[in-house]
Image: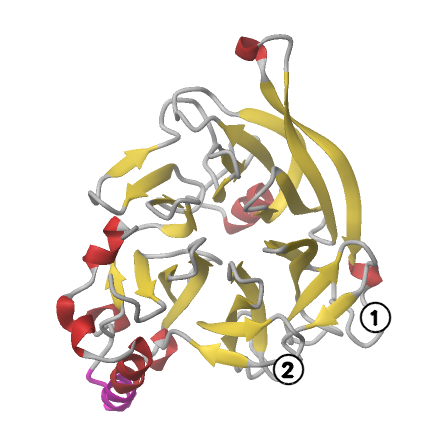
Amino acid sequence: MNRPHRKLFSSRLDSFSGVTALILLAMLGMKTLSQAGELPDPADHLPPNIQRLTWFGERADWRHDGERFVFLNRAYGDVYEYDLKTGRILPCTDHFKHHGFVRAHYLANGDLLLSGPQTTFDRTDPKARQQARDASELLVLDKSFTKPPVALGIQCNEGPAVSRKSMKIAWTHGHQDHISTGEIVMEGASPELMKPVLKNRQLVLKTQDFPEGERPRQWIETQNFVPGNENLLTVTAYEIQNTTNTETYLLDLNSGKLTNLSQTADRYEECEGVFPDGRWTLVESSEFLNVRWPLVDLYKLALDGSGTRQRLTHFTDFKGWKGAEGVVSDDGRFLLFQNGKSGQESGVGFGIFLMKLDDQPR
């Protein structure tokens, strides 16, 4: 069945045999002009397979039917849902008191898993903002967007990993040096009293579990369960061996085995959304050149450990810009991502973009 958001793209796509050729041609032109200093903003010069959807917002996540997505209007802000058929934006979190959110993910049942600070804080103080992010809690918001969320009673650093098929989640906690898994179940004496509860909690990874020679200085972060085999979890390890090197790993939840997927001593490689075929993950990647948090673009990285990668965005061809925070639709045909600027807080975005990943008829 044709999906409504395919109509967002111009008929320009139909005159070419494939998206790959379009991307290559567009990128060659973009790079040449960018080097000449004529294109300061990549959003003004997008290839035909990318369309801008919003001029604000960050950290998008697909609904599992691919017809809508949620995003934050800003860090520590509210959550909104975007309807790709109509272009309408629905507020999700303006009906209850809160201190803002840093993540929102669709659970398998359609509810939202939110992550946000537990108390008020000084939004003008960078240290207070970071502490609020580190001390965020996980909550479940009913899909009706009419009820207050229910706290799961756990602290979460950065974003959780959420299963596409079950209510299983993973999250980073402590000093961003531990990862645990659990399952959200509904409990209550009657249907009216049912509420989400986190069960089967299990600590699955600590910074100290990484092999000698590959151990991160402190920080690790979970990202995604691998479709087709949810005993595998993608994980980022930051500042390997006290350097600026960041790598993407695959964690086997049964054996505890860690596989370095990116295998690059000279690049920043932070994993993002996984592809539904279970063969690839997105990574934010850059030649960091001794920079801790460089400007990045999105690449596909193979999950087979070969280190094979393919570049998808070219926002860093324009000085001071990046393309980041990518997530792939459940059918594997579309990618949501955001733009970002140098000198901004981690994860800050200035709009949501939609990329078409294939050349199938709309």
The amino acid sitting under disc 1 is Pro
Decide if residue 105 is on the left or right side of residue 18. Answer: right
Q: Is residue 265 above or below residue 143?
A: below
Mark 1 lies on residue:
211
Q: Position of residue 93 (x, y in %)?
A: 39, 30
Residue at position x 55%, y 68% in the image:
280
Q: Is residue 30 magenta?
A: yes
Q: Find residue 264 and name its label.
A: 2
Relative depth, front residue between 9 and 314: 9
Q: Residue at x 41, y 48 (%)?
A: 62
Residue occupying image coordinates x 32% and y 57%:
350
Residue 276 spot, x, y in % from top left: 51, 58
The residue stretch that appears in magenta? 28-38
Quarter of the image where one finds residue 262: bottom right
Q: Residues within 10 Å of mark 2 (few under 14, many from 20)?
A: some
Residue 20 placement: quadrant? bottom left
Task: Say which label, 1 or 2, has the lower sequence index.
Answer: 1
Query: Is residue 134 one of those drawn in magenta?
Result: no
